[in-house]
């Protein structure tokens, strides 16, 4: 392409095969295939049907991953989502037991989640001096605390109308309903992050907040929206979790925030903001889910699975860093 | 003139406002329940919150360099479980050696995390999140679904019951830690380096401070204290379980934040951290005394944390505005 001055501008990225395989997403696909093969070798029951049957147990966390990726891209964090899931599940169960029609129960769960998101978003955008980590640490305690108060002394509630909850965990062929919703969400979230204004603004804010503000992006409104989406999707995760467990208690959703963040980070989305691709996180999420199903099938100690995920998480961040510093050292050498 | 500026210095400092908050809290609680202000009760509070009090010191150092550590409760459990099981199966009988082993395990965990952060350039929240999973899993795996109860711990649990010069030994450990850290951060080169790295990493690097080493050292300190607390918790609660002190890291971070320690590094002090931890401890003890249901305690605690940090921001904003106004004159 010739520029105004007649000089050649060659800035269009070249998508060669080698480059796309060596990208982080390419490596993730290879890891994904390796995990599938490994699990198949380890467990004879690791068939498509069985994996899909067990998926709903692990898949509700993926609804938390989608908006969490957006929040991380902004350079923020939300560690209150596990508690939002708890509060939303509690509200849904109680509403359902009080005889509320099921569609309204769903609406209530999403609304409770959204409302928690609004609280987070308001505090974070009103007081930008406060790190989101600390704000959501506070609300994490509050949201679960409210659920504890509502649940009272027993600390748990189970749904009496389990039929309607069971209805949403039905399946078409081997595919659970939830799987289709996950695919739809994945497509929408990828398109929004790559092609839509909102997604590009997220990235811009994450890479340089001040520049984005000066170039006319409504920084506060965008951050606020991201937190509200996070809240609503926590409600959605709560819905599917309740559908799988027919109840809620004070520990529902405990630690989900860490799992969602782990999926995003393993997928190459940096917690410092402005970096990463949605698609990488989605592959990473499925790697973790499939690995958990496979290792669960061979009755591996669940703590050992956590150990593996912990190591994967650190390795996912440290390996690119090391290779980058090697490259830098090489460059320095060739210059000298 | 001089007197006024001293007064201003006192009223302007964050620690002073924290002392006022703590005093007000204590007065309210004492009015509502005169039994609160007895020496025994206060010593009991100190003993029961010794873990938070000690870990707050390490977290202060970590936050000062602009980091964060959410793996501490897992490190604590790993160290506590290791020592508890060593005693249970008769490999260990000396209490002193038990503490040494716990501290060594904690320091090693801290060293691993520190190297990953300092030299691997991994963001602290991710590295310590990985550490949180790994060390907690190790705590379960060393246990192999076993745990050490009061009978198995033998003389180890006596440490938390014995007194030295009229004070419980646990409280002595807390006091010694606070004295060491106060001196360390205020008057040693290393302590000033921590502040330097946290306030401006690049400037610190240029002025010849080895930033990576300071970061590693800070996480080693944090790990050491977590290991110490692992042994302490095993002794105080007379049991070592793999899920011990789960979620403690959030209490510790909350104590630091209430104590005015900045999350972005460079700001915070040992007295502030102490006051933050004490305020949190008094709130925890006071809520049931003033008739708030045990069930509502977490909500109140959360609301208080959010209120305190928002109040901090608002005071800071008014201070900044006042300073600007003065400059305009």
Image (cartoon, coloured by chain):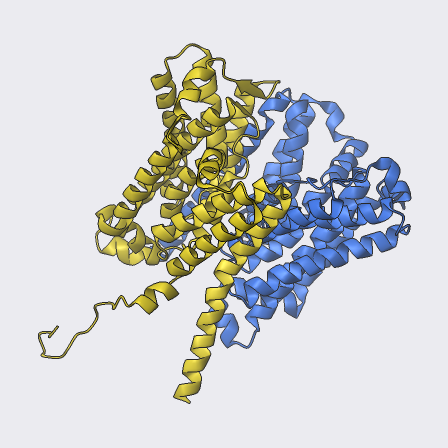
Chain colours: A yellow, B blue
Please identify the quarter of the rendering in which residue A332 is found: bottom left
Please identify the quarter of the rendering in which residue A231 is found: top left
Location of residue A92 in the rendering, given as x and y in whole percent from the top left corner: 44, 21
**B223 and B279: which one is in front?**
B223
Residue A157 appears in view? yes
Residue at the extreme bottom = A336
Please identify the quarter of the rendering in which residue B118 is found: bottom right
For the point 90% across and 52% down, which residue is it? B94
**A55 and B42: which one is in front?**
A55
For the point 22% across and 48% down, which residue is it? A197
**The N terminus of chain A: image quadrant:** bottom left
Residue B266 appears in view? no
Q: How many marks?
A: 0
For the point 28% across and 68% down, which residue is it? A16
Residue at the extreme top = A99
Location of residue A218 in the rendering, given as x and y in whole percent from the top left corner: 25, 46
Location of residue A314 in the rendering, given as x and y in whole percent from the top left corner: 53, 57
**B294 and B266: which one is in front?**
B294
In the picture, measured across the screen, residue B40 lies left or right of residue A335, that is right
Location of residue B228 in the rendering, given as x and y in whole percent from the top left corner: 75, 51
For the point 49% across and 16% down, which residue is it? A159
**The C terminus of chain A: image quadrant:** bottom left
**A168 and A174: which one is in front?**
A174
């Amino acid at each position: 392409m010739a520029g105004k001055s007649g000089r050649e501008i060659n800035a269009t990225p070249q998508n060669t095969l080698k480059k796309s395989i060596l990208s982080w997403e390419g490596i993730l696909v290879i890891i994904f295939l390796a995990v599938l093969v490994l699990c198949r070798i380890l467990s004879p029951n690791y068939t498509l049907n069985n994996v899909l049957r067990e998926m709903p147990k692990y898949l509700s966390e993926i609804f938390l991953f989608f908006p969490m990726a957006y929040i991380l891209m902004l350079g923020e964090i939300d560690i209150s989502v596990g508690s939002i899931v708890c509060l939303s599940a509690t509200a849904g169960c109680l509403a359902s037991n009080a005889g509320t029609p099921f569609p309204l129960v769903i609406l209530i769960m999403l609304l409770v989640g959204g409302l928690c998101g609004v609280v987070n978003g308001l505090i974070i955008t009103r007081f930008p001096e406060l790190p989101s980590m600390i704000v959501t640490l506070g609300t994490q305690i509050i949201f679960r605390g409210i659920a504890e108060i509502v649940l009272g002394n027993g600390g748990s509630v189970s749904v009496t109308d389990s039929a309607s909850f069971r209805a949403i965990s039905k399946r078409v062929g081997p595919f659970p309903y939830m799987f289709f919703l996950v695919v739809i969400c994945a497509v929408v979230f990828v398109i929004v992050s790559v092609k839509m204004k909102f997604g590009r603004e997220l990235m811009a804010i994450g890479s340089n907040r001040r520049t984005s503000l000066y170039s006319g992006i409504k920084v506060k409104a965008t951050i606020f929206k991201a937190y509200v989406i996070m809240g609503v999707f926590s409600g959605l995760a709560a819905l599917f979790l309740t559908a799988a467990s027919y109840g809620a208690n004070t520990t529902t959703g405990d630690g989900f925030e860490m799992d969602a963040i782990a999926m995003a980070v393993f997928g190459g989305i940096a917690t410092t903001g402005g970096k990463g691709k949605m698609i990488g996180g989605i592959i990473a999420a499925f790697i973790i889910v499939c690995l958990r199903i496979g290792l669960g099938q061979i009755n591996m100690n669940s703590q050992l699975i956590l150990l593996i995920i912990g190591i994967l998480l650190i390795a996912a961040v440290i390996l690119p860093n090391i290779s980058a510093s090697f490259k830098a050292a090489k460059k320095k050498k060739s210059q000298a | 003139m001089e007197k006024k500026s001293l007064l201003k210095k006192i009223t302007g400092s964050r620690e002073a406002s924290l002392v006022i908050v703590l005093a007000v809290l204590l007065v309210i609680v004492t009015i509502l329940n005169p039994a609160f202000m007895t020496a025994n009760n206060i010593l009991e509070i100190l003993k029961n919150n010794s873990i938070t009090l000690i870990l707050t010191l390490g977290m202060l150092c970590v936050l000062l360099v602009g980091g964060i550590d959410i793996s501490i409760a897992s490190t604590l459990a790993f160290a506590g479980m290791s020592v508890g099981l060593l005693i249970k199966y008769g490999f260990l009988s000396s209490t002193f050696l038990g503490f040494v082993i716990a501290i060594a395990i904690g320091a090693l965990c801290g060293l691993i995390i520190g190297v990953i952060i300092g030299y691997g350039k991994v963001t602290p929240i991710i590295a310590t999140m990985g550490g949180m999973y790994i060390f907690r899993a190790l705590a379960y795996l060393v246990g192999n679904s076993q745990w050490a109860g009061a009978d198995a711990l033998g003389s180890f649990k006596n440490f938390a019951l014995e007194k030295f010069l009229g004070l419980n030994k646990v409280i002595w450990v807390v006091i010694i830690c606070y004295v060491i850290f106060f001196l360390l951060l205020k008057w040693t080169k290393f302590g000033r380096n921590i502040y330097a790295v946290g306030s401006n990493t690049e400037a610190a690097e240029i002025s010849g401070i080895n930033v990576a080493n300071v970061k590693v050292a800070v996480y080693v300190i944090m790990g050491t204290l977590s290991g110490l607390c692992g042994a302490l918790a095993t002794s105080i609660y007379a049991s070592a379980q793999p899920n011990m002190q789960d979620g403690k890291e959030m209490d510790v971070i909350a104590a630091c934040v209430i104590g005015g320690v900045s999350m972005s590094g460079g700001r915070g002090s040992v007295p502030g951290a102490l006051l933050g931890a004490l305020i949190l401890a008094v709130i925890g003890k006071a809520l049931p005394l003033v008739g708030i249901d045990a069930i509502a305690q977490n909500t109140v605690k959360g609301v208080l944390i959010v209120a305190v940090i928002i109040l901090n921001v608002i005071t800071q904003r008014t201070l900044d505005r006042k300073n600007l106004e003065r400059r305009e004159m």
